[in-house]
Image (cartoon, rainbow, N blue to C red):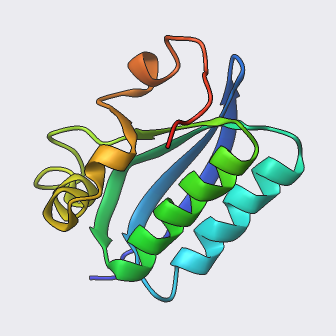
Amino acid sequence: MVVTFKVTGGERGDWAVLQVSGELDMVTSPGLRQHIHDVVAEGRHSLVLDLSEVLFCDSSGVGVLIAARRLIRSCQGSLRLILPAQGAAEGSHVNRVLGALGVRRLFDVHPDLASAVKNEAGPLSA
């Protein structure tokens, strides 16, 4: 089975939204990192990463998420992740990985796009 990695961008109100699907690993994570940097370079500091269709995430993928949080924080922006309890195939793999590593608490997590963009964006805290 071949899994295609794909990142598509869009906007929802004041939020830039990146929808990610496939496997987020050592090979594909630099692509996501570049998309995030491109969004910030455009002056967008409120970002939603929809990871509900990510089937696999390794440490390099987690590293990109943590780096994205740091980047958005340095711009006094907001980063929200969409990590549903049930997502791609058998549940949100990213949700389980972040929880197992103890870093899920670092992120503002939402079950869907509607709730992620519902409230006004505020800067990330420590």
Q: Quadrant of residue 59?
A: bottom left
Judged left or right of residue 19, residue 13 is right
In x, y percent, where is residue 115? 40, 17
User: Residue 58 versus residue 12: which sits nearer the camera?
Assistant: 58
Residue furthest toward the bottom?
Answer: 27
Q: Quadrant of residue 56?
A: bottom left
In x, y percent, where is residue 41? 87, 53
Instruction: Identify the residue at horizontal 23%, vertical 52% (top origin).
Output: 95
Instruction: Identify the residue at horizontal 64%, vertical 46% (top origin).
Output: 73
Please determine whether, in this image, residue 80 is positioned above or below residue 71: above
Q: Is residue 81 visible?
A: yes
Residue furthest toward the left?
Answer: 90
Please determine whether, in this image, residue 29 is positioned above or below residue 73: below
Judged left or right of residue 28, residue 94 is left
Residue furthest toward the front?
Answer: 126
User: Residue 84 versus residue 124: which sits nearer the camera?
Assistant: 124
Q: Quadrant of residue 107?
A: top left
User: Residue 116 versus residue 67: which sits nearer the camera?
Assistant: 67
